Image (tube, rainbow, N blue to C red):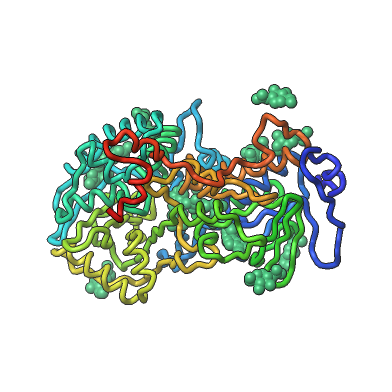
Amino acid sequence: MRLPLLALGALAAPSVAHVVHPRDDGQCKQTTVAILGAGMAGVAAAQTLHNASMDDFMILEYRDQIGGRAWHVPFGEDEEGKPYIIEMGCNWVQGLGVPGGPQNPVWTLAQVYNLSTVYSNYSNVSTYNQDGYKDYSYLMDLYDDIYDTAAAQAGVMLSDNLQDQTAKTGLAMAGWRPKEHDMEAQAVDWWEWDFEDAYTPLESSFIFGIAGNNLTENGFSDEDNFVIDQRGFNTLIHGMASTFLKPNDTRLRLNSQVTNISYSDSGVTVHSSDGSCVQAEYAITTFSLGVLQNAAIDFSPALPQWKQESIQGFTMATYTKIFLQFNETFWPSETQFLLYADPYARGYYPLFQSLSTEGFFPGSNMIFVTVTEQYAWRAERQSDEQTQAEIMAVLRKMFPDVDVPDPIHFLYPRWTTEPWAYGTYSNWPPSTSLEMHENLRANTGRLWFAGEATSPTYFGFLHGAWFEGRAAGREIGALLNGTCHANTTCHGRKHYERLHGTTPLADYSAVDGWTANSFYDFNDD
Ligand SMILES: Cc1cc2nc3c(=O)[nH]c(=O)nc-3n(C[C@H](O)[C@H](O)[C@H](O)COP(=O)(O)OP(=O)(O)OC[C@H]3O[C@@H](n4cnc5c(N)ncnc54)[C@H](O)[C@@H]3O)c2cc1C
Ligand SMILES: *[C@@H]1O[C@H](CO)[C@@H](O)[C@H](O)[C@H]1NC(C)=O
Ligand SMILES: *[C@@H]1O[C@H](CO)[C@@H](O)[C@H](O)[C@H]1NC(C)=O
Ligand SMILES: *[C@@H]1O[C@H](CO)[C@@H](O)[C@H](O)[C@H]1NC(C)=O
Ligand SMILES: *[C@@H]1O[C@H](CO)[C@@H](O)[C@H](O)[C@H]1NC(C)=O
Ligand SMILES: *[C@@H]1O[C@H](CO)[C@@H](O)[C@H](O)[C@H]1NC(C)=O
Ligand SMILES: *[C@@H]1O[C@H](CO)[C@@H](O)[C@H](O)[C@H]1NC(C)=O
Ligand SMILES: *[C@@H]1O[C@H](CO)[C@@H](O)[C@H](O)[C@H]1NC(C)=O
Ligand SMILES: *[C@@H]1O[C@H](CO)[C@@H](O)[C@H](O)[C@H]1NC(C)=O
Ligand SMILES: *[C@@H]1O[C@H](CO)[C@@H](O)[C@H](O)[C@H]1NC(C)=O
Ligand SMILES: *[C@@H]1O[C@H](CO)[C@@H](O)[C@H](O)[C@H]1NC(C)=O
């Protein structure tokens, strides 16, 4: 049902200054809710409004398709010459859930839409160094034991509101101290941490890194399933959209690059690069943290300091999968993961995943290697030829007894320069408080912020985007239909003009010889 704008206006919460825009001022298209971006968060927000019988919304999307970072492309060829569909973006449903227990909403959707997935067995890993196969898997067992101790410690720190540390510090305190020159330990360190967070333990929050992992891997379950569906992972997002969008629905505007957003306490106006504009009572931006950080959008008025600080304070990672297809499978394809310890650099083409394996695409002769951060940025600046040559040199070290052929197909995305993403997903940096993250999530006037990065619990994950889209849709829905009560947060989210530290100056009074003045004068002493 498409509610007329005035009917919705009449139902709006009386406590909110409400402006009824003229139906058509000759320039801007009118809508009740403008949803910016058609990835998981945007589509979940729209479905939430639809579920509450609020169908007067518009979705503006930069690209010619929905799905956002759930993005697949054709690659290589099978025996009939037909390409395989591979995922450039998200690839796993992470933390599935147990029957009767809480279930990851993405896993629920995977069942509704019959998504083909394979269980990722992280114990099914072989270890290599520059001389070929070398079993250093005992380091993984050691890490796993220490991790449990560290996770418990992080839990205490969280509940006692103690000072956050880097994950490197937290893990070291529990006993995991990989030496910088011990490349096998460094490879295991990358596999155990960076493979998920796409930043090093030194660049990650101990408390929120562990809590985030807990909420997904213990909150649902510790199983991750790898998506091999030849319709693509985003078939779930298409499925959701089909519950409220008709074919060629004019409420979905593809190829619409938003360039300017002006917001106030009475409405939001959005301009796109083609000169079109949309005027809405409320808007939800679901742009990635990378898009917000790169000033790709002109906000009017400029976003407040507290908002800008939260955007620049959180971190956007890069996680790049590089795909290769060969004319034969020369690696041990019965094993899912092959970890490589380079003698000179941590994170140098560290992890290969066989796609030729039973359950995946047997006989495909495909494998992919993942790089993060420095080596992802480096690969993204390099030509395909350069990157391919480096990977081939690594594979020839890993398999010294094999005549390793060159690949017949080679492909990888450049996430950091995609103007609709600018990176892959967010990570919680050390010593970044919940307050700062609440500022990232808070609305400015009638502009709401949603997406993977705004989830304090599931940041970085596809299900984080689902929860955040739903939350924004619910809050705006409640404001619009007048079910927003003083005892809910839906009048707007909390933000902090000034962030609070964990070491008030007063604490120094306990230190002999310190006064507030001596603190400030310290450098002059
Ligand atoms: C390489 C990679 C691997 C990942 N692996 C996993 C995984 O295995 N499991 C998992 O759970 N999660 C994974 N993720 C994370 C997951 O993909 C994201 O959390 C999720 O897709 C984000 O959804 P979103 O709606 O918040 O943002 P997006 O999907 O980015 O949606 C935002 C939309 O806004 C559009 N947009 C941007 N700028 C503009 C503009 N100016 N005007 C109009 N539209 C614009 C974009 O095109 C996009 O469609 C991975 C991500 C990447 C990139
Ligand atoms: C909308 O309602 C459908 C049907 O009840 C449900 O499956 C879906 O999860 C709801 N969407 C959201 C985002 O809550
Ligand atoms: C689900 O997918 C599997 C494998 O792709 C297929 O064999 C099965 O027929 C599908 N089931 C339905 C109900 O679509
Ligand atoms: C996972 O892999 C390990 C090591 O190869 C194996 O022992 C175990 O049985 C596998 N688990 C499953 C569920 O396949
Ligand atoms: C991975 O699992 C397969 C099948 O169970 C098995 O043949 C193989 O040896 C395992 N590899 C490792 C490294 O455990
Ligand atoms: C993580 O989970 C473990 C095991 O359930 C728990 O002991 C710990 O407190 C949790 N830590 C955090 C930070 O949530
Ligand atoms: C949708 O648009 C396409 C391209 O303009 C057209 O071919 C198709 O018939 C339209 N479908 C419907 C249901 O209107
Ligand atoms: C959008 O922002 C750009 C860059 O600041 C500015 O030049 C342009 O005038 C703005 N357009 C609108 C319609 O506000
Ligand atoms: C693959 O190609 C190499 C040459 O690049 C060749 O030596 C090898 O025999 C080929 N393998 C198969 C299975 O055709
Ligand atoms: C009002 O909106 C909320 C949130 O979307 C929804 O849960 C509720 O059912 C709606 N109530 C009515 C009367 O539409
Ligand atoms: C919020 O207020 C409404 C009525 O104003 C009441 O029915 C509802 O129980 C309250 N909810 C909570 C959680 O206090």
Residue 236 makes an appearance in the image: yes
Residue 332 percent location from the top left of the image:
23, 55
Please say if 380 is above or below 334.
Answer: below
- Foreground of the two, 214 or 339: 214
Compared across the picture, whether 414 is left or right of 353 comes to right
- Give me the residue at 62% from left, 46% from top: 44
- Foreground of the two, 227 or 451: 451
Residue 71 percent location from the top left of the image:
51, 59
Quadrant for the N terminus in the image: top right
Please say if 293 is above or below 482.
Answer: below
Q: How many marks?
A: 0
Compared across the picture, whether 339 is left or right of 250 comes to left
Residue 385 percent location from the top left of the image:
33, 76
Q: Quadrant of ligand 5?
A: top left
Quadrant assignment, res 424: bottom left
Residue 229 makes an appearance in the image: no
